[in-house]
Image (cartoon, coloured by chain):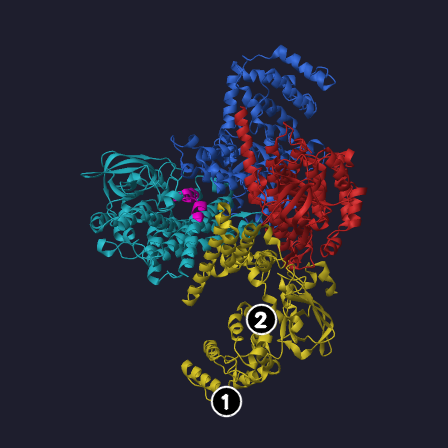
Chain colours: A cyan, B blue, C yellow, D red
């Protein structure tokens, strides 16, 4: 975006926004979050096929629109604003990018078109145990207890993945597992033998989580798999999530602004109390800073030929620095906005009937998803230090 | 009740002990036992002799309660709003009102609820717009109340409603006893974001109150409400009663039912406070205790909660020593908000993804998730942090009051559009 | 000045280049050279032809300045308050005032200062109580101003003073040019907590201003002051001039003297901003970069300062694209305060005890200590954070304005007791 | 204090307070901080001999008043309020307690009476290099580059100590140094051979710092020296400093309260603006919490027979926990109060003429002195975990 979105991007945002305003009202969100599936297949089909959101960042030859991370981030921001319920993040952001990065040409041609068109839903399974996105998962030295054993007919997968977003809705799972080399990405059909998917009850019912167990499940290795691709995927996912989060925070700020101006106590609107005014000003500042970071992270992804980790000119440390910077900043403002929005609504903000808690819960689940703000700050600083070392070495 | 009053506290407590030896029966009917208590005057010894008490001091009355506790005997009903009703009636009710309601308050036969807050008047309680219009010998009630704990169990409600729209805000209110069991009163449970439903909404559509249920005089409702609110702040210690129900006997079975109803809205309150007690255990379970960054946050929480505990103890010690209350006495609620918020953050970081889970496979039965979705209530319930800061700034620090925008006839005061309709 | 105006910007700049080739002399006397500039109209080409300019657009004038820079030629004097004086005179001065002051502003012969803020009116500039009483053909000035940068060098001051105490606050002020070199004006340097003295206090005791030095009309002073303040916000970029003084020639020696005076108040400004640029270096020097807890704080600072930089760039890009300014444009000052505060904390933690030292044996010549004692100014100078938050809340978010307590005759407005005396 | 000061303690506080109000006005502070010595000998003599402040916590048989840490903390709090300039902290708090803890009976009888009476001034030299009070210094496993070599005539000291408070004014230095055992405390005459004291220019001129170098300086070992005593001394010093700091913060809060009520802008006192009101309420809360912690730390010292590390009933982990808790809390509120006080004064608060910066600078120097808040939080938690381990072991 180079600090400003183009006219085309603004128009694209408007069309996404209008669509979601229509199809993802809080009535829709409340209806869908109470279901096990958690999304509306018809809306999914429309956004994938009519608006091309699922493929906006994918190559035209595979059925995408040929744009990049900035446009993907625009979709995520708007979905964050309306709390869209559906597997966009799991399928279009995480799984599609994993296939794009780690799949060879044939695998991309075979697997991606149906995901881009939304006909199939995929998801990405990474974390194990407590679902922690620790330094090890972030680094290329990660080890996983899930294993892929080579057989004559491809691989057999064994292990357990936790907190997998939208696994219940997935046709295809992209799974990170150890193999005879290091670790790699494996494609597993959700309906395949030995795949057991258990939905988790989460405080945030708008983002569906599941545990997935594999017992000798047939799996196809993505042929260009390399361990360092996991880091890039975390960067992409973090950037997308950061944009989703600033979208959500914007809705919360808007809600607080509108409610405090309507709400009268002691003969005046509560927005006229300086304590409220100043906190809203501070929240605006924090949000605009986090937005800038989220936009910049998307731009840095776009600038650094992210689709190939072989690109020597790509500044992967800058990509990681900005992705984690954005994730840390967005996590904090999202939760802050949610808490302020509840507080400024007073008692009514704590009720089920009021919509604020829907965003509050998404803010909470986004805070821990992909790693905590503290973990991302550490990750960012490591990437930053790597750059300054590079600079010193090259100087 | 007509018996000669012994002189010293010791004599009184010995007398009560003797009386209990003669009268206590764990297999008695709960209401029958408490009726005996009410008539004997030992169930509320600090109440006047004319109204089921013995006119003794509050201190002696407390000593008598200790005798009951030591003896293992059940006392009068004290849960919920009923004691606020009693205190208000004792101070502002007339003779007929006291005779009519006080006995059944002590026996626990009647449940009560408070009908003060409204959707349009939360922090600004005196801005109530529920209207009470005199029609012959009855007041006709229209409007809505909210945050009414246990209203769905209540026989009677303590209601403030506006009887005069041309008076200033605080002067147009009146205070009533409302019979909850009538067609114009509808009670709805209000679900919270944490899935619990501790409160109700109450809707009035031409509900009726006989004129004799007006407490004090018309227009004096705010003064009467102040009495209720003052007693609300002296919170009831439920732990003693809750312990007692583990004893054996028919009477305790009945008591347990009563307590279950009154405890029900509060089951999530420990989580609302942030469960600081769970932090170290969780940090050890997850290994967060070994992370230098997490240790800092855990330490901050420990510092905050210990300091708040000591500050409360300072306030208590000063009060006990008869010293004027220092600033430390007014800060507990703000400190509690800070503790709860920080605790939620620490629990999130310690538990990471597990913090989200609520189902049967979750950590400690989903308690961490319940903390996270309950904590936001601390800084709102019982007076928002913003109101608390105003109180501390104005009453403790002596800083200037907020400029007023709600003087003059209430009819002309700007208020929430939803609430405006009732003033026509 | 009477020459035919070329048409295109390119033609103009070529013409100026030609003119410079013919006239520029690095060994010239600075004032003589600038007098030539003023008379040629090339030194302030966007000013009117009648007043040392050529009536060209601001854009063309900027292109001409670029030619000067490329050529290495010295332009007119632009430092300090003199350009604010010029802008104000051009908009509100009469013909005589413009002829009298503008030329010597361009040549740099006269220094100017601003006399707006008072001890009793800082955030509330319009609450000024310095009085100007008309006495025959002179105004008699009594009162005090403060935060007057370079007042000790100034020949003239831009003064707002109260001429009518019965008018409303903003309507009783008038705007004057004050001759600083007279017995009733005393200038004192004001030391800061960081040991620097960037500002002055100015005391008036029956100082005199001839009636013809009133700008605009009596009572219109606030409107005139708005012009001055609007130009103050377009801050002068000192870097270009500062670079130029490294060139050789007599004229640059004189220029350097001028710039030293104008730069002097600002030497500690980089420290005031928190010196984020030094953080990583210091963290490596001390090993703090290896401490996980310190890394978190360093990372927070990096996030904040990078985000603020990108936010400023977003605002700039939007402006350049002709888009309406979004909220991001009004937030820079608040962000700068946060950055500076956090940077001070980080520097303290990184340097530990060494952060305190100021002497010759200290780290980097005491720069860390200077950061710590300078940073508190960021959130005050140029409009406190509180004022900024009000501006953001009211102008950007559209929230209600503060209730007013300063309407009606200024004589009756409550103000600081120290300042009250002057109103008698 | 058991959560309330006794009448005697309150009276003692009043007399200290009256004395300091009289003798340590900001005029006095400004006069003294500009001198190299930094204190008024006459006032020192009065507070030592007439009011017995220097010995309030020392045994009667050595010339003290026989009270304990709570009374010492009262003196420190009042000194913090008035920003008293003088070697109380160095001599009465640090050095006297070091002698009391590590000296044998004869050494105490020889050295302490003159320090208690104020006739001699002593100071404690611990930190080296960057003056860091790191975990190592806090622990019993510390090593020091300063060494004490045993000779026939006692020890010879070599090394360099940094950031020694009031070294310039000291007659006697108590120095922590390695010896042939582990490390111990050594008494050195400031006038002895090879002692070189260099004053440091500090941003806080009310607390005088110096570097001290020893070259074969004759030193006397304190005969009961044990490494674990350093930890107790840090506890005592931290507790005293915490009390000093809450005193200073109280003065800053009082100043902000009084100025904001006097200061009118826009026709109203700035204390009537809710932004100011609420921040003052928050500051009061933070200060009262920190005060409770500082008082509790003093009481815990008093309760745990601190004068003997041999006492088996003493809960040294509780002492450390509370001392570091109080230090961390007090550091943060002191700086916070100073920043708020400057901010609420506006421009005038940044001037030299206004007194706020005197306390601001003391707040800054107190923040780093004895270790940062983060270091004390870590130290506190370590002590807390040690207790719960003990509890588990004994259960």
Q: The numbered mark 2 sits on a residue in which chain?
A: C
* Residue C228: numbered disc: 2
> CA gap, disc 1 to disc 2?
30 Å
* Residue C2: numbered disc: 1
Instruction: Please say whether residue D48 is one of the residues in the magenta stretch.
Output: no
Residue at horizontal 67 percent and vertical 21 percent from the top: B63
**Residue at the limit of the structure toward the left, as seen here:** A152
Q: Position of residue C31 (x, y in %)?
A: 59, 82
**What is the quadrant of residue C86 in the picture?**
bottom right
**What is the quadrant of residue D344 in the picture?**
bottom right
- Front residue of C256/D334: it is C256
Which residues are the magenta region? A358-378
Can residue D235 be seen here? yes
**Principal secondary structure, stretch drawn in magenta:** helix
Q: Position of residue D389 (x, y in %)?
A: 53, 30
Verify CB contact (< 8 Å) between mark 1 and mark 2. Answer: no
Q: Is residue D133 above or below residue B115?
A: below
Residue at horizontal 74 percent and vertical 47 percent from the top: D171
Q: Position of residue C242 (x, y in %)?
A: 53, 72
Query: Mark 1 or mark 2: which comes first in sequence?
Result: 1
Can residue B408 be seen here? no
Q: Is residue B137 above or below residue D172?
A: above
**Residue at the limit of the structure toward the right, as seen here:** D50
Mark 1 vs mark 2: same chain?
A: yes
Q: The numbered mark 1 sits on a residue in which chain?
A: C
Q: Position of residue A395 (x, y in %)?
A: 42, 61
């Amino acid at each position: 975006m180079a600090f400003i979105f183009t006219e085309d991007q603004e128009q694209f945002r408007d069309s996404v926004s209008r669509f979601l305003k229509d199809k993802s009202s809080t009535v829709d969100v409340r209806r869908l979050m109470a279901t096990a599936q958690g999304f509306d297949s018809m809306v999914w089909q429309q956004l994938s096929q009519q608006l091309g959101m699922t493929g906006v960042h994918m190559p035209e030859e595979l059925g995408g629109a040929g744009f990049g991370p900035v446009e993907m981030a625009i979709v995520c921001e708007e979905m964050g604003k309306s709390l869209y319920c559906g597997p966009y993040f799991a399928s279009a952001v995480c799984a599609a990018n994993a296939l794009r990065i780690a799949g060879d040409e044939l695998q991309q041609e075979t697997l991606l078109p149906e995901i881009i068109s939304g006909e199939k839903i995929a998801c990405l399974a990474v974390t194990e145990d407590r679902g922690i996105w620790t330094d090890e998962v972030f680094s290329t030295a990660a080890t996983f207890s899930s294993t892929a054993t080579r057989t004559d007919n491809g691989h057999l997968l064994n292990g357990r993945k936790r907190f997998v977003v939208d696994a219940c809705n997935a046709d295809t799972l992209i799974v990170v597992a150890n193999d005879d080399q290091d670790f790699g990405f494996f494609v597993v059909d959700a309906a395949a033998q030995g795949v057991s998917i258990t939905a988790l009850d989460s405080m945030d019912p708008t983002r569906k989580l599941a545990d997935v167990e594999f017992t000798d499940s047939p799996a196809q290795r993505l042929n260009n798999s390399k361990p360092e691709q996991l880091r890039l995927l975390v960067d992409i996912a973090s950037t997308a999530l950061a944009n989703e989060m600033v979208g959500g925070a914007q809705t919360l700020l808007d809600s607080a602004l509108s409610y405090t101006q309507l709400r009268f106590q002691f003969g005046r609107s509560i927005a006229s109390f300086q304590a409220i005014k100043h906190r809203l000003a501070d929240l605006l500042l924090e949000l605009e800073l986090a937005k800038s970071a989220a936009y910049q992270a998307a731009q840095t992804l776009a600038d650094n030929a992210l689709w190939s980790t072989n690109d020597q000119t790509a500044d992967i440390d800058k990509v990681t620095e900005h992705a984690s910077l954005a994730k840390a900043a967005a996590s904090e403002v999202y939760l802050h906005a949610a808490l302020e929005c509840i507080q400024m609504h007073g008692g009514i903000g704590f009720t089920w009937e009021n919509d604020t808690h829907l965003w509050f819960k998404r803010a909470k689940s986004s805070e821990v998803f992909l790693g905590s703000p503290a973990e991302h700050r550490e990750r960012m600083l490591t990437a930053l230090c790597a750059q300054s070392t590079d600079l010193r070495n090259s100087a | 009740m007509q018996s000669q009053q012994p002189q010293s506290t010791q004599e009184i407590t010995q007398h009560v002990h003797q009386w209990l030896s003669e009268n206590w029966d764990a297999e008695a009917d709960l209401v029958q036992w408490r009726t005996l208590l009410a008539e004997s005057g030992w169930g509320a010894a600090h109440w006047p002799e004319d109204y089921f008490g013995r006119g003794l001091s509050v201190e002696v009355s407390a000593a008598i309660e200790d005798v009951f506790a030591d003896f293992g005997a059940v006392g009068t009903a004290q849960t919920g709003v009923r004691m606020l009703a009693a205190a208000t009636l004792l101070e502002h009710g007339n003779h007929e009102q006291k005779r009519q309601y006080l006995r059944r308050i002590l026996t626990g036969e009647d449940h009560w609820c408070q009908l003060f807050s409204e959707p349009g008047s939360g922090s600004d309680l005196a801005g109530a717009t529920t209207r009470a219009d005199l029609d012959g010998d009855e007041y006709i009630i229209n409007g809505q109340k909210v945050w009414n704990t246990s209203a769905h169990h209540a026989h009677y409600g303590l209601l403030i409603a506006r009887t005069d729209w041309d008076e200033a805000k605080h002067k147009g209110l009146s205070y009533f006893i409302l019979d909850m069991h009538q067609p114009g009163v509808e009670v709805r449970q209000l679900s919270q974001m944490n899935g619990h439903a501790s409160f109700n909404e109450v809707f009035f559509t031409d509900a009726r109150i006989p004129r004799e249920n007006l407490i004090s005089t018309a227009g004096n409702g705010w003064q009467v409400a102040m009495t209720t609110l003052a007693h609300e702040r002296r919170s009831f210690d439920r732990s003693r009663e809750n312990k007692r129900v583990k004893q054996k006997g028919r009477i305790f079975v009945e008591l347990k039912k009563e307590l279950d109803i009154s405890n029900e809205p509060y089951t999530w309150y420990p989580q609302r406070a942030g469960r600081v007690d769970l932090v170290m255990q969780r940090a050890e379970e997850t290994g967060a205790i070994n992370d230098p960054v997490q240790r800092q946050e855990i330490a901050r929480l420990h510092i905050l909660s210990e300091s708040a505990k000591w500050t409360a103890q300072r306030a208590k010690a000063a009060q006990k020593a008869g010293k004027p209350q220092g600033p430390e006495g007014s800060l507990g609620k703000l400190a509690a908000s800070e503790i709860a918020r920080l605790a939620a953050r620490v629990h999130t970081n310690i538990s990471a993804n597990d913090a989200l889970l609520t189902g049967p496979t979750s950590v400690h039965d989903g308690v961490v998730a319940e903390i996270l979705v309950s904590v936001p209530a601390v800084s709102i319930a019982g007076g928002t942090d913003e109101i608390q800061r105003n109180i501390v700034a104005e009453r403790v620090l002596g800083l200037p009051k907020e400029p007023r925008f709600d003087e003059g006839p209430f009819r002309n005061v700007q208020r929430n559009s939803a609430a405006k309709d009732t003033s026509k």
